Image: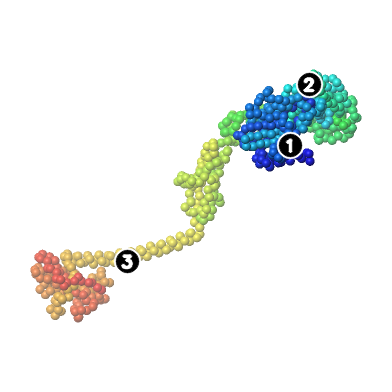
Amino acid sequence: MHLLGPWLLLLLEYLAFSDSNKWKVEHPSTFYAWEGACIWIPCRYQIPRGSALLDNLTVYHNYEYNKNISDFNGTILYNSTKTWESPSQQGRVRFLGDQRNNCTLSIHSLLVGDSGQLGLRMMTKDDKWMEAVNLSISKSPFPPQIQLPSELRESQKVTATCLLNFTCFGYDIKLQWSLEGAPFPPAPTIISSSHTIKTVLTQSQLAFEPEWSHHGKNLTCQVWHSAKVLSEGTVQLDVKHPPKGVTTVIQSSTRIREGDSVTLSCRYNSSNPTVTRYEWSPQGLWNEPSHGVLRIRKVAWDTPPISCAACNQWCSSAPPVNLDVQYAPKDVKVLQISPELEIHAGNRVQLQCNFSKSHPKEVHFSWKKNGSLLEEKGRELNFDSISPEDAGNYKCLVNNSIGQSASKAWRLQVLYAPRRLWVSITPGDRVMEGRKAALTCESDANPPVSQYAWFDWNNQDLQYMGQTLRLEPVKVEHSGSYWCKGVNRLGEGKSPPSTLTVYYSPETIGRRTTMGIGLCLAILILAIWGVKLQQNWKRTRSQQGLQENSSGQSFFVRNKKVRRTPLSEGPHSLGCYNPMVEDGISYAALRFPETDTPRAGDAGTSETQGPLPNNEDVVTYSVVQKRVGDYENVTPDFPEDEGIHYSELVQFGAGERPRAQEDVEYVTLKH
């Protein structure tokens, strides 16, 4: 219950002040010292409100929480004033911090009664906090602790640490090492002190290599102050040492060549304890057939130096032995000396045959290209002006008295602009319409062509940049020549034109044949129709020519029914047959007045002998009737016969033109 008291008080403090859990105070949990010495307490704090300042710090010894007054009671070792006095003006307990984040304290002239718990009561205007610090004060100085590795081995460097959980400014102490009462080692050791918020200690580290003769001896660390030993700590050394004088012996009197068999043995002079096993280094490369003897059946050219170790609890290794194996040249490879980067066509190129090791070192060189031996025998292979044909796989061969070694194939790449472009057509240069055609731009370039361009027979850019131009479906209109252009970062090249021929499919041929036959029939019909029209036109022109040749005078045809002359007056009549209009008009009769006697002439003429009377209408009646036979004079039987139409012929000539009467209409010719 006594142990829970401080924690219970802290819990009550937390409940009383809800914001106190935001305080952050860092320092070592426990401090150790002895009577008469001092303690340095490094401390750092953080106020919940970053801008707040520490107003008061009170240091209690063995404090308790008083519920009646809701505060802490205890022996006050330090209480800050408003002026925050400097450490030189303070008493045995000194505050070395500040009002923002440093709460470091020092306590001088320690007493055994100072052991216990210190309470750091920190307050601001709006907040307060209690921090606990443990003190452990002994009557006399306590001994230091000596830390050693778990095992000590002869000639293996180790570090021994003398550690004292104490440090205080103004109370100087020293740590000194000794071995069996004698200072050890002769050189002084490095002493360091730590007084951080994590640890407070003084330590000395001793680095040494134990010898087998150190086994069983005492190693001591002493604490000195004012030329006086305050305390000391001692440990006994337990040094494990391997066998002594271990050597590796090669049991062979001749030179060792790659692939030979080799025998080695492991020997030693002394060992404590007795040797129980042997180890060979490097491990895992061979098996140990017998105790202390190593047999290598086929030694490798790169066999490393071999060492054996004679072991008891620990092992002692012998100096490594080099087998000095002779071998053919190794790591043969081809190097590009110039140019350093890319090789372009026309550059000067130098290759070099290189190897890492050869034993013996005297070597000879030779070269191969694509498996064929070249005439060059030197270490370098030179090209004054390299061409794409020089590209290929090159090997160099190096041989000595042991054997010959060849490099891996080294690919010589020559970069050049596109060349030898041509267009390949799939499935062929003759394709039926409606199917698929692919035109591929083949090229020889390094690096490969990065961009293509396609052109037709009119050198028109087809705006396509792929390597393969696909025509799906292909049409007859696609027939023609195509060529392509290839571009890489070194230049460009053009292909010659390739011709694609697209022929009609059977379906298209059938459709076009049908259309041709129909077109021919249409043309034939139109031709026949034209011939008929031409014949009709010629007949019409012939009839008009007969009328024009009859009199040479113009006349109009009128229909005037009211002025029809009775048949009884006995007019003269003249019949006319016109063979050019046989299909339209078969018969015509012209009747003339009695006062005039017409001159014999062609049908349809109006010429008379003698002048026509003035101021009188000269009326000529005609009867038009469709007949099949020859012409004849016709006298109409009925005035209003449906098939007979009368007309008035008015002659125009010299004299006044008779005025037309209002009841005259133009004639209608009907057949």
Residue 62 coordinates in the image, percent (x, y): 75, 34
- Residue at numbered disc 3: 532
Q: Secondary structure at mark 3?
A: helix
Q: Is residue 223 above or below residue 394?
A: above
**Residue at the image point whose x is 88% and y is 31% from the top:** 312
Quadrant position of residue 193: top right
Q: Is residue 173 above or below residue 471?
A: above
Badge 3: few (under 14), some or many (20 or more) residues near its Cα, within 10 Å?
few
- Residue at numbered disc 1: 64
Residue 52 coordinates in the image, percent (x, y): 61, 34
- Residue at numbered disc 2: 225
Q: Nearer the viewer, residue 155 or 659?
A: 155
Label 2 or label 3, whichever comes before in sequence order: 2
Label 1 or label 3, whichever comes before in sequence order: 1
Q: Nearer the viewer, mark 2 or mark 3?
A: 2
Quadrant position of residue 114: top right
